């Protein structure tokens, strides 16, 4: 299960999506999420699904990779769908005590589950096709106007980049610790819920120790390279909007317009 968590991983490539400016991809993600929340019927969700499939094809990201990333979050998706199942209006198809299922509730549950999955997959595509360094530079440039308000933009972008970068590392470390504990007779999949929670204690302690050790090593490495807060950072590669970035943003504007139009259509 841990190996299925792919958030923060970067798959190098030379596709159209990889070559886009990181600022363009960040703006696209925000626009895609906005259009996703504007979707209100079958046509709107069909459009968003088609856009996601096209993005994955252009970035040469296999559907299996995207779907495997959903496995650790499937419980959240199902739980959210079940909650929305009982909040529909109209004539009841099934009713017991305070629980009431309607056709509108089923529609809400399906659409909410689909919305969460599309949102997660869209976010995964950003990290799959953008390196942590590019994400840091793009986010810092987008938030640069906030520097006039004395917001530590550079530090915030660096922290977010480091957090994304170390997610795969911590997952790999957790998998190694679990394998070592299982070799010593520990069991994480059997027993009652309280027993499983108690079995996680020998896993969490070495994981926290490893995480703090890596954080200390990273801080020492940054200090040795004279990294300090404040000042003006220089970049080896300057970010420049190309024609493909402008066309991508125009497509995003069209997507938002289409989402608004489809929202007004019937289900």
Image (cartoon, rainbow, N blue to C red):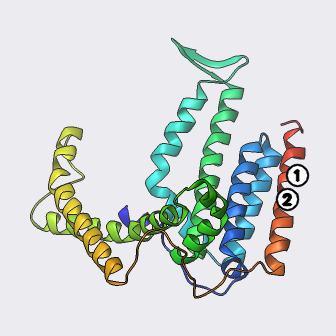
Which corner quadrant holds the C terminus? top right
Q: Is residue 64 visible?
A: no
Percent x, y of residue 10? 52, 76
- Looking at this view, name the residue that lies furthest to the left: 184
What residue is at 62 percent from the left and 86 percent from the top? 237
Callout 1: SS: helix
What is the spatial separation of the Cα atoms under label 1 and label 2, in whole angstroms? 6 Å
Question: Is residue 216 toward the left or the right of residue 143 in the image?
Answer: left
For label 2, count other residues whose C-alpha is less than 10 Å away and answer few (under 14), some (14-19) or many (20+): some
Q: Give me the residue at 62% from left, 71% from top.
A: 138
Q: Position of residue 136 (x, y in %)?
A: 55, 71
Nearest the camera: 10 or 106? 10
As drawn, the residue found furthest toward the top would be 97
Q: Secondary structure at mark 2?
A: helix
Going by the image, does 187 lie left or right of 99? left
Residue with the mark numbered 2: 253
User: Which part of the image, by quadrant, shows the N terminus?
Assistant: bottom left
Which image quadrant is residue 100 in? Answer: top right
Residue 206 location, quadrant: bottom left
Q: Judge the density around disc 1: few (<14), some (14-19), many (≥20) Cα neighbours within 10 Å.
A: few
Q: Which residue lies under the disc numbered 1?
A: 257
Q: Nearer the viewer, residue 164 or 188?
A: 164
Residue 12 visible to an observer of this rendering: yes
């Amino acid at each position: 299960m841990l190996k299925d968590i792919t958030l923060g991983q970067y798959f190098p490539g030379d596709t159209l999506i990889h070559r886009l400016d990181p600022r363009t991809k960040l703006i696209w993600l925000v626009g895609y999420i906005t259009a996703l929340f504007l979707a209100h019927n079958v046509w709107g969700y069909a459009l968003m699904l088609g856009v996601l499939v096209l993005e994955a094809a252009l970035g040469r990201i296999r559907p299996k990779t995207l779907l495997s990333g959903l496995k650790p979050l499937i419980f959240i998706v199902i739980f959210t769908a079940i909650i929305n199942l009982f909040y529909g209006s109209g004539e009841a198809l099934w009713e017991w005590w305070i629980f009431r299922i309607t056709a509108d509730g089923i529609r809400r549950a399906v659409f909410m589950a689909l919305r969460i999955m599309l949102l997660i997959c869209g976010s995964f595509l950003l990290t799959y096709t953008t390196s942590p360094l590019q994400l840091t530079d793009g986010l810092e440039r987008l938030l640069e106007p906030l520097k006039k308000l004395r917001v530590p933009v550079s530090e915030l972008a660096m922290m977010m980049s480091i957090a994304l970068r170390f997610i795969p590392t911590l997952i790999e470390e957790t998998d190694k610790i679990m394998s070592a504990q299982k070799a010593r007779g520990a069991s994480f999949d059997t027993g009652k819920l309280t027993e499983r929670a108690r079995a996680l204690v020998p896993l969490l302690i070495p994981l926290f120790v490893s995480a703090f050790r890596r954080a200390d090593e990273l801080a020492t490495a940054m200090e040795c390279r004279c990294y300090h807060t404040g000042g003006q950072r220089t970049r080896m590669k300057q970010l420049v909007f190309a024609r493909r970035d402008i066309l991508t943003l125009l497509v995003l504007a069209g997507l938002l317009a289409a989402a608004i139009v489809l929202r007004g259509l019937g289900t």
